[in-house]
Image (tube, rainbow, N blue to C red):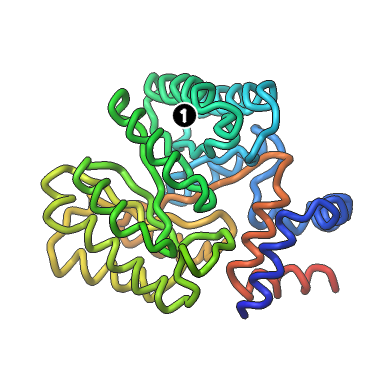
Amino acid sequence: MPLLRDAFLLMSTNPLMRAFVVGFPLSRRVSRRFVAGETLPEAIDVVQKLNRQGMSVTFDHLGESVTTESEAREAKDEYLRALDAIAASQVSSQVSVKLTQMGLDLSPDLCLEHMRQIIARAKTIPTFVTIDMEDSGHTQITLDIFKTLCAEFDNVGAVLQAYLYRSEADMHMLAALGANVRLCKGAYKEPPQVAFPKKKDVDANMIKLAEIFLGPTGQQNGAYLALATHDEKVIRWAREYTTAHQIDPQRFEFQMLYGIRPDLQRQLAQAGYTMRVYVPYGTHWYPYFMRRLAERPANVIFLISNLFR
């Protein structure tokens, strides 16, 4: 359903549609399938429930592309509060951060300053920080900042998107660094000049990139792969590949989004794999919610059924 996907991706950046959806009372309730809540205590409650089911978590305080330094500082401070809450509640959770939320588009130096504070605080817990990947226009500077931070800290990771042509070269570079990488398919609308337009090509590239990271170069350098997918074919391939090649389960994990395939999440955790759930929270849930609807027809069916209900 590419047309439906494109429509939801366009709506994710449309201010008029955003105002309509956010102002519609039912939207908040329906969004709770994918968003843990608007406050930190609500999110901590969700993390505790997931931990009791044998799953780990990575927190995401929703928000991106801030327009002022004060907004960037407030976003940074919210992450510091989230890290303090993780420490106080002793939950098993990391955090994921978007650089544009930390002020990247305003000043790379300001963004670096904020990230250093977050990663340093995380190290005291200790826990881990993953730098989320955004649209292709931010890919290179995101990786540049990651490499700078990676030289200073050992508790920071990056994300690569399988739908970008450039990701194969980036994966080789990160494997040589021995980096911790979350590999996902990608959720932004990208032109065919930079990204595979067909799903089957994205799927094939995801497996190709995972093989690079799980292969000899990644193994020699201590690289760690987080395979972020709900695609059962890719998951089945990963289980068979890692078993056949006797790859240590401590070298990789599975990651999925909160609210999508919780049954499969529990199955993987019960099978003994590290299963990490990406748990977003906060008031800026609209763009994230629209991208989740764009990804799978089942999510749209869920929304429509709730509207009729």
Question: Is the N terminus in the top left, top right, bottom left or bottom right quadrant?
Answer: bottom right
For residue 59, side relative to residue 154 (left or right) = right
Callout count: 1
Locate residue 70 relative to residue 219 in the image: left or right. right
Residue 229 figure quarter = bottom left
Residue nearer the viewer, 48 or 293: 293
Can residue 212 be spotted in the picture? Answer: yes
Q: Which quadrant of the figure contains the C terminus?
A: bottom right
Residue 88 shows in the view: no
Q: Nearer the viewer, residue 45 or 159?
A: 159
Q: Is residue 201 left or right of residue 172?
A: right
Label 1 CA crowd tier, 10 Å (few <14, some 14–19, many 20+)? few
Quadrant location of residue 272? Answer: bottom left
Q: Position of residue 198 (x, y in %)?
A: 48, 77
Residue drawn at 35 percent across, 52 percent down? 226
Q: Residue at x 40, y 33 (%)?
A: 145
x, y percent for residue 21: 83, 56
Tell me the SS state at disc 1.
loop
Point out residue 268 in the picture as x, y percentages from the top left corner: 38, 62
Q: Amino acid at mark 1?
A: Gln
Query: Residue 39 is drawn in which quadrant?
Result: top right
Q: Residue furthest front?
A: 193
Which residue is drawn at the image coordinates 57% and 37% (left, top)? 100
117 over 195 or under it: above or below: above
Q: Is residue 30 above or below residue 130?
A: below
Instruction: From the image, tell me which residue sits under label 1.
Output: 90
Q: Nearer the viewer, residue 115 or 289?
A: 115
User: Which residue shows up at 50% across the image and 45% down it?
Assistant: 138
